[in-house]
Image (spheres, rainbow, N blue to C red):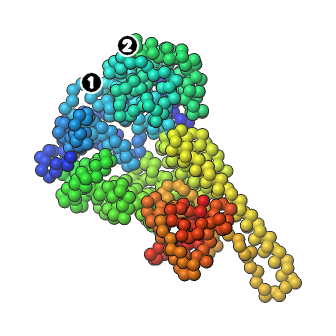
Amino acid sequence: MRPWLLALPILLCLPTVAVPSFAASRDFWIEVRSPHFTVISNSGEKEARRVADQFEQFRAVFEKSFPQLRLELGRPLIIFAVRNEESLKNMLPAYWESKGRAHPSGIYVSGEERHFVAVRTNLEGENPYEVVYHEYTHAIMELNFRVLPVWLGEGLAEYFGNSSIRENEVDIGKISPHHLRVLQENKLIPVEALLAADSQSPYYNEENRVSIFYAESWAIVHYLMLNPDARKQQLLQKFITAWDVSGNQAEAAQQAFGDLKKFSQITESYARAGNFYMAKVNTSVKSDPRSYETRGLSQAEVSANRALFFVHTRRPKEAESSIVEALQSDPTLSLAHEAQGVLAYTKNEFGPAEASFSKAIALPSPTFSAYYFAAMSQLHGSPGAVNPDCVGELEKAIAMNAQFAPAYAGLASLYSMQKETQAKALVLAKQAVELEVGNLQYAINYAHVLLNAGRFADAKTLAVRIQKAARTPVDKENSDQLLASVDEFDLHAKRAAEYEERAKRAADSRSRLSAFDSPAAPATSEPGIKHPATVADSAPQTPQSLDRSNRTEYMVEGIIAAAECNANTSGRVTLTVNGSPMRFLYPSLAQLQVVEGLTEDSGNAPPCQDWKGKRVRLFFYKTKDKPYSGELQTVQFF
């Protein structure tokens, strides 16, 4: 069951440029580990513990008030708490490279295997990290909900981000002075237009949080969360329930809020009144900051962590510099080699990435993400020759971090390729979905695993549900492709059954006739019968297979990058899959089956000289110890 935002205890409402080398730095860096966060700081132990404690308190707001929400991000959240603006400039040079650009007090960056925060500690005020808490709220909501309407997502992030953290309590729903000013000085967006806005709307600008869209969204969420009448009627929960069913914001708003003109008048009056409710959340449930584990960091450790931060903030030059620094200081540091691998991985340089990750997991204290990326680099780099070590590496990643959804999805895809492990694949694929319900791709991956297991009806049911749940253009495109794949699977399965039935009838017929023929005459299979291979697009993109009596035929989908057109001699076809080349050998064009579409019509297939740049499925037999991925049997254009 999906958690709903208002299924919570009643809150107490009260009226109202290049980075300088660290080799030259004399900063002393420490690491403080709280139950849910890691702080790396050059501001001293006291400040590092204070920052860790503040984040624990902010997290406790959700834990105390919304017990149904999942709060485990599934990957570490690492906070750089630096002592002054100069230190933050070294972490975020882009904000100081352009004249007139605002200098942030902090930043939040999400990544596949880590989340990063960078903040200054020498700041005054009740909530200097509002923008960071805003983004952390987004991360929690995205973990629990597939897609929230833009106004609701931003309104919630503004509502919680504007909180004051005290020793054992947090004030939420505080008045936002700049939002009030914007609301009082500007004409409000018509509520119908606000509720219908998406990421492409002219009202919405993610870079401009000081805007009427953010202010009005904040005010509406504030009203829904804290106004006694709105809470009594559970308006927010009603809206989310209706939105989840229909996917239509206007329809959901009318069902939940009633007459939208009247609702607009109520919320506008609320926004302009300036008399707001506020809530206090007791956060004494958090652990004692004096118990947080603390240790000093070596120069290599700091540089390696900085390198990973630079990779995630898209500063490859600074990342490379920090990697060199870390490896020169300590070539046996596993994290330094992992950072080198992550940088190569983001550039799609999978060979060098795999080499770096292999070094990382061979050294002491590798992370779960080093094992995960070691497997994924091999899968992306050599999709035609999957190394069995990938399974072990993904299993190790899960053993080290049981909350990391990407490893479950990757392992499920690998397990789904073998009949004896397909039951495990189904369990793993479902776990990935449950860990991150907000990521529709894991549900799509689960559907492909169902297909590989031959559970076509279940896959079709799930595909229809995914299509209904899709909200963004990308999700809708992916769900449409999934449904098409399911229909294609079903067609192939029916054709395979027909082929098998024809072969059985032919064999029975020959058996009956054998009484009149020579007993030495061998029975032969019906000519022209072809059993289709299993098709799948699930991540990671690796060849899918169907076991045969003697050999296993594989299928892979991609774009033809090059093809040799040799009518009577062997030739090569190069396929691009996820940016990586796969090379196949065929005996001759005369012996190669080339078809068009699901009907396998060879008459409409394009000539060899026109193959380049076209999307195809290649059916092949894998080869061992050969300089190519497999022996090509069939080329299917579609």
Residue 390 visible in the current orientation: no
Of the 4 image quadrants, the one containing the C terminus is: bottom right
Give the answer, above or below, for where 112 lies relative to 245. Answer: below
Looking at numbered disc 2 in the image, what kind of residue is underneath it?
Gly
Q: What percent of the width, then of the height, locates residue 313?
A: 31, 46
Mark 2 burial class by Cα count in 10 Å: few <14, some 14-19, many 20+? few
Label 1 and label 2: CA atoms lie apart by 20 Å
Asked if labels 2 and 1 touch by Cβ distance under 8 angstroms, the answer is no
Of the 4 image quadrants, the one containing the N terminus is: top right
Residue at horizontal 55%, vertical 24%? 253
Q: To which residue does mark 1 refer?
A: 126
Residue at horizontal 48%, vertical 52%? 408
Residue at horizontal 19%, vertical 48%? 19
Residue at horizontal 54%, vertical 14%? 262
Nearest the camera: 592 or 106?
592
Mark 1 burial class by Cα count in 10 Å: few <14, some 14-19, many 20+? few
Q: What percent of the width, then of the height, locates residue 464?
A: 63, 44
Q: What percent of the width, then of the height, locates residue 430?
A: 54, 48
Q: Element at badge 1? A: loop
Q: What percent of the width, then of the height, locates residue 55?
A: 32, 34
Label for residue 274? 2
